[in-house]
Image: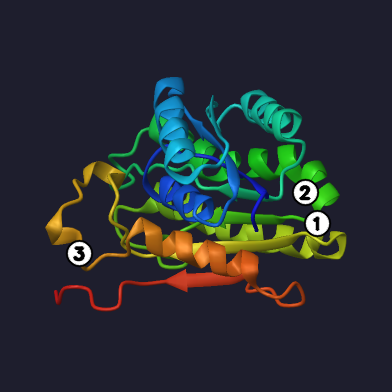
Amino acid sequence: MKGKVAFITGGSKGIGYGIAESLAQEGVHSVLTSRSQANADQVAKEISSKYNVKCLGIEADVRDYKAVKSAVDQAENDFGQIDYVIANAGLGRFGSIEELTVEQWQEVIDTNLSGVFYTIKSSVEALKKTKGYFISISSLAGENFFAGGATYNASKFGVTGFTQAVMLDLRQEGIKVTTILPGSVSTHFNGNQPDDSDAWKIQTEDLGEIVVDLFKLNPRTLPSKIEVRPTQPPKK
């Protein structure tokens, strides 16, 4: 894996950061997108200096296809190749159908679902060149609906189905495609403040380890969908 290049959306924090750090430990260079150039630059500098790899931060909102395409083009121009693409950027807005606004619906769908489409659409030609790997980060909410989750469920059900179809589209091109469906992860998602009480949750480095394992797996074998749960969540 050393010397490979990863493109990660939402890479400045949370799951995206955990994946970038795990890949850096394997000698993988990375391009991290964020809606904040300052955050992207800070994390890129941190990973570069800590692991002696190249890391570039780019401001790009995944809701904007042109911004994503520009970021992918810059990544390929600067690094000469893209081997791995991880569509991670996402957000959640929760509430009953009476409470949800049209603006919230559009924000979640545009970020979580359209953002994944824009990411693979922008990078598929680069991945063809390297016989690369595309991963989307869905959620267990992409298979299990719950009250107050209509918008988030819709987006993540969409990501799961979309990615599985893309897997079938691209497998004959030599591109491997996987969607990862995590349960509770210790991040700042939905206002959570990670602390010791989050010890039971999946940690971001755990997901990074899974991604590394996927990239190391024999090319003939493809885990196309992976559900990831905390081993022992609190009893309700």
Q: Which residue is mark 2?
A: 127
Tell me which label, 3 or 2, sits earlier in the chain.
2
Q: Real-space Cα distance between discs 3 and 2? A: 36 Å
Q: Nearer the viewer, residue 223 or 169?
A: 223
- Reply above or below: 4 against 234: above
Residue name at image x 60 percent, y 56 percent: 135
Secondary structure of the residue carrying numbered label 2:
helix
Give x and y (percent) for residue 10. Answer: 47, 39
Residue with the mark numbered 3: 199
Q: Which mark is residue 175?
A: none
Q: Residue at x 39, y 59 (%)?
A: 205
Query: Please, what is the three-letter code of the amino acid marked with disc 2?
Result: Leu
Q: The residue under label 3 is which amino acid type? A: Ala
Q: Can residue 142 be seen from the camera position used here?
A: no
Q: CA distance from mark 3 to mark 1?
A: 37 Å
SS at badge 3: loop
Report helix, strand or loop for mark 1. Answer: loop
Marks 3/1 in contact by CB < 8 Å: the verdict is: no
Q: Residues within 10 Å of mark 2 (few under 14, many from 20)?
A: many
Question: Is 210 on the left-hand or right-hand side of 46?
Answer: right
**Circles 2 and 1 in contact, beta carbons < 8 Å:** yes
